[in-house]
Amino acid sequence: MNSLENPTICAISTPAGSGAVALIRMSGSQSLPILNQIFRSKTQKKDFQEIPRKIYFGEVVDEQNVIIDEVLVWYLAAPNSYTGEDMVGISCHGSPFIQKTIVELLIRKGCKMADGGEFTMRAFLNGKMDLVQAESVADLIASQSRTSHALAMKNLRGGFSQKIQQLREQLLRLASLLELELDFSEEDVEFANRKELEQLIDTLKSEIKTLVDSFALGNVFKNGIPVAIIGKPNVGKSTLLNALMNEELAIVSDIPGTTRDTIEDRLNINGFTFRFMDTAGIRASDDTLENIGINRTYRAVEQSFIVLYIVDTPETSIEEILNDIDYLKKNHHAENKEFIVIGNKTDLLVTLPSHFQKWNDLNPIFISAKRKENINLITERLSEIATKSEMGDQTLISNARHYEAMSCAYEALLQVEQSFQNNLPTDLIASDLRMVLYRLGSITGEVSSEEILSSIFSKFCIGK
């Protein structure tokens, strides 16, 4: 492309506002000529073209030779840059006025203001990264926990892309044999052993299904581990949320049924982000509004990864706790949830209840939410559960677009399997295989549309 079709772009790559320093970047064929027009070196007289990838100190000056700022600049020659094009970085002082003045100068010299994500889009279009890696750049910038950072870094390094590539290569081998049979359809020959093909499809189906199922865990790691705080009215759910967050988020009252909606907030514990959901108390009620809140409690349980089940220690029997947990597991998709039993109101205990010894099997945590006693034991238990659940070497899906594409690929592969079992014509089987390949290719960008790319990169910040 020429400079008119693919203009040189510029943008501020650091957050808005004042700071010690700011970074302004250019990308495109005119980056170096524009830099030579505005930059006056104070340490090196050599041309950037002779010694790229070196930092130079000097001044940015405007058309009247007025000094705008003292800066550090660097130049990277194509294709050895983030975008695969010639790139320039200008590190100036963080004054918003200085940043704005330099950008305006670059635009007057021929730069175009970059759109959101345009630097990363150019990196994708120039083959510096695939679409999964490009999306991981945005995830990395947005990461707020150890797990979301690790997941973004793994995908940025090509972990998920390599898995997709392996699946596509196996499918391409299968598809090529079937396409070859179509070329010789009049001769009625089979190049592909049907038994081996069915075994390969069965293996691929299992691998793709594992990836589809991993979305639940991947989404948890990316957006925070959901924790439902549940229990009967007035057992101290809202008081516990306030104690965990160390602020008064939820209304606390002795009147049963005060909490009628789900209150949510986030807390980072040892690098893990947890999303705590304070819910309405579970009980039989004739109040329409309270029943809506109770139904939302059950939804929170279904959406959660961990359930903090809070009980009134002096008043609750072990049988009641076991019955309640059993009900939730059977009726609200909680079979695989991590339940932590919290015995609250220990400050009201005068003597140990007769049933106290039976609690040991539940591995409970005893607290006084009102006095904020033993709250650290809850955060430690949560951290332990999160650590055990870390991804390790497994490949996880955390992006909704990838999940949709993998789900469609799985459905198409089921259709291929059914076609084999029903001895359908080879051309129909080959058509279904092409759909699987298309869905997998759409994830990494091997097949993509301008509409999809615009949707993805428009969510990036300007300057990245």
Image (cartoon, rainbow, N blue to C red):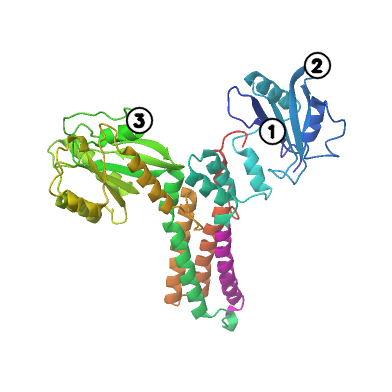
User: Closer to the N terminus: mark 2 or mark 1?
Assistant: 1
Q: Amino acid at mark 2?
A: Gln
Q: Residue at x 55, y 51 (%)?
A: 154
The amino acid type of the residue labelled 1 equals: Arg
CA distance separating discs 3 and 1: 41 Å
| Mark in front: 2 vs 3 | 3
Residue 173 in magenta stretch: yes
Magenta stretch in the rendered image:
162-185
Which SS class for mark 2? loop
Residue 389 seen: no
> Between 121 and 240, which is closer to the camera in this rendering?
240
Give the answer, above or below, for where 11 lies relative to 339.
above
Residue occupied by mark 3: 246
- Residue 69 coordinates in the image, percent (x, y): 73, 21
Secondary structure under tag 3 reads loop
| Residue at image mark 1 | 25
Q: Is residue 422 above or below residue 302?
A: below
- Is 357 left or right of 335, judged from the image as shown? left
Tell me whether the residue at label 2 lies in contact with that at label 1, contact meaning CB atoms closer than 8 angstroms.
Answer: no
Figure label count: 3
Q: Position of residue 72 (x, y in %)?
A: 74, 29
| Residue at the disc numbered 2 | 64
User: Which is more toward the observer, 34 or 376?
Assistant: 376
